[in-house]
Image: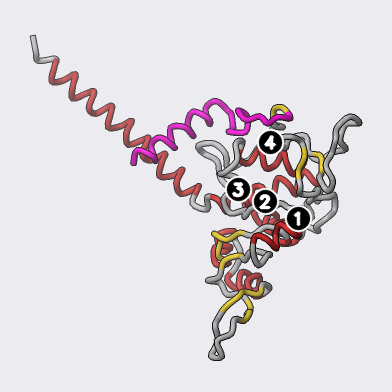
Amino acid sequence: MRRLIAAASAALVLGLAGLTPAAFAATEGGALPHTDFPHVGIFGKYDQPALKRGLQVYREVCAACHGLKYIAFRNLVALGLGNDEAKAIAEGYQIPDGPNDEGEMFERPGRLSDHFPNPFANEKAARASNNGANPPDLSLVTKGRDGHEGYIYAILTGYEEPPADFALGEGMAYNKYFPGHQIAMPPPLSDGQVTYEDGTEASVANMAHDVVTFMAWAAEPELEERKAVGLKVLIFIGLLTAVLYAINVRVWSRVT
């Protein structure tokens, strides 16, 4: 209960101040760019169309290097997908399973109960394919970085040509928001890289915003429910305080 009240109080302060956690964060490259995410703030809710577009960006771009191990395919129903659509997405993945009757491991099409798999068999395979870096799982990435959504968005949109006097390591990319400005991940997004079904322009900024929204949902699918409970708790505490105050005044008013 104490954690819930503290979280709700912090959200209330940020919401009333019109600020997001990203507004307080900075990297070695300077302050993060201002980005609005509708789900941030005490009354914030996830942008459902952005969540669906973000899922598309994840599947078509990010899933080549990053897993999503804490999200099961059945969870996608919360994004507005039907069971058949979620099942079709699951069946597009090959999931390791076994052993079979012969004692051998095998792969099978995914099921709704399966989680998004890691694209690499192990960490060494991941590092060998990514210039020595191990691509992080994206399930909780927005919670594990200072600046949260704002920081991830900044990294995705912060690629540019390095200054003339900057010594860029072999196989590295320059990113003005990444600590040290050298990152092993090449620019993952480019304009027109995906084709959105709803006709939204697939610019780098839009794709970054959508996929970060999706990653925020992956890290906290119950966010809207938590906020609703937190608001009810704050209202209850406010009413209880008023009642106790009124009782206190009434009791002590009789003392002369």
Mark linked to residue 130? 1
Label 2 belongs to which residue?
50
What amino acid is found at the position of numbered circle 3 in the picture? Val
Label 4 belongs to which residue?
35
Whether residue 240 sits left or right of residue 25 in the image: it is left
What amino acid is found at the position of numbered circle 1 in the picture? Asn
The span from disc 2 to disc 3 (Cα, nearest Å) is 18 Å
The span from disc 1 to disc 3 (Cα, nearest Å) is 18 Å
The image position of residue 223, as x and y in percent, is: 50, 47
Q: Quadrant of residue 116?
A: bottom right
The span from disc 1 to disc 4 (Cα, nearest Å) is 29 Å
The span from disc 3 to disc 4 (Cα, nearest Å) is 17 Å
Label 3 belongs to which residue?
141
| N-term mark: 3 or 4 | 4
Residue at 61 percent across and 73 percent down: it is 87
Q: Is residue 165 above or below residue 63?
A: above
What amino acid is found at the position of numbered circle 4 in the picture? Thr
**Secondary structure at numbered mark 2:** helix
| N-term mark: 1 or 3 | 1
Q: Is residue 107 above or below residue 244?
A: below
What is the span of residues highlighted in magenta in the rendered image?
A: 1-29
**Secondary structure at numbered mark 1:** loop
**Secondary structure at numbered mark 3:** loop
The image position of residue 1, as x and y in percent, is: 34, 41
Q: Residue furthest right?
A: 164
| N-term mark: 2 or 4 | 4
